[in-house]
Image (cartoon, rainbow, N blue to C red):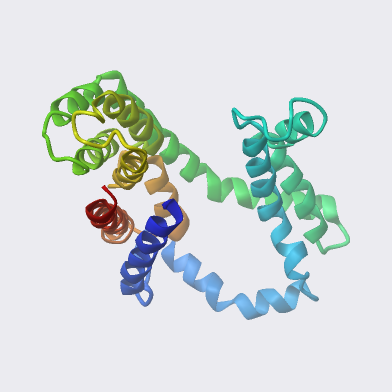
Amino acid sequence: MGVFVAAIAAFAGMLWANRFKNEEPDGEGAEELNQQLDQLDDLKNAYGKLPSPTKAFAPIFVPILLICLGSIANFPSKPLGEEGIFSVLVFLGQPVNALMIGLLLSLSLLKSDKKIAEFSERISQGLVVAAPILLITGAGGAFGSVLKATEIGAFLGSSLSALGVGIFMPFIVASALKSAQGSSTVALVATSALVAPLLGDIGLNSEMGRVLTVMAIGAGAMTVSHANDSFFWVVTQFSRMSVKQAYRAQTAATLVQGVTAMIVVYILSLFLL
């Protein structure tokens, strides 16, 4: 059910994103980024023989795979047991350890004879690019924590849970929490806790009702990503978009995807409940 709903939401997001495929980023550093893209052929030639796709993408995909395997090993059902391979995957699946392995894999991509000097240069370049993102992301996360400390989530949840709108109630509560404090995780967990005792009252206490409730909460938890969401700033900084441009692209895209997913959930509820 989740794959079906998510696929339609992703397609809607892709259609929205296509509106911006020919639009140039207008934020700080956009001109420099465009210059780097114009010099891409020169950069390829200077690098020499390019690595294979497996070698090039391994520093990205291997850590992701390790983190996923670590998460699977940590399932409450313990599908891999509690010893041996379980301990190995839990250790390697820790984000810091997985990213360290990715870093070690990336060292094979260094091409110059003076690898230590090249490594130091790459680290310096990475710090210059990452520092503003880390600062802004940290500020966004701190702002979200301040909002959570005000208990605005509990107030919104208790106020909206009594609306009596059926399958739309979990979506409205989750989207209100997400928009208010910026964290999808907090919106998911808080909405689940608020909605679970009310499933019988809103007619969603069946097995399929619970499935659709989960889908509705997930749809709400992506609606919408804006300035109090640290991920919003990651996207903005990496893509060199201005805040105004990011609201039209990133924020509106999450709105389109969330609403589309909820519409699909509602249509499914008409046939399955």
Q: How many marks?
A: 0
| Residue 180 at x, y percent in the picture | 24, 35
Figure check: 96 above or below 66: above
In this picture, residue 33 sits left or right of residue 228: right
Figure check: 161 above or below 184: above
| Residue 118 at x, y percent in the picture | 77, 55
Residue at image point 27% right, 25% down: 194
Figure check: 235 above or below 13: above
| Residue 12 at x, y percent in the picture | 33, 65
**Residue 243 can be seen in this image:** no
Front in this rendered view, residue 195 or 33: 195
Front in this rendered view, residue 259 or 177: 259
Residue at image point 64% right, 31% down: 74
Residue at image point 41% right, 40% down: 136
Front in this rendered view, residue 207 or 184: 207
| The furthest residue to the left | 163
Residue at image point 17% right, 40% down: 166
**Residue 126 can be seen in this image:** yes
Quarter location, residue 167: top left
Front in this rendered view, residue 270 or 127: 270
| Residue 45 at x, y percent in the picture | 73, 79
Quarter location, residue 81: top right
In this picture, residue 210 sits left or right of residue 170: right
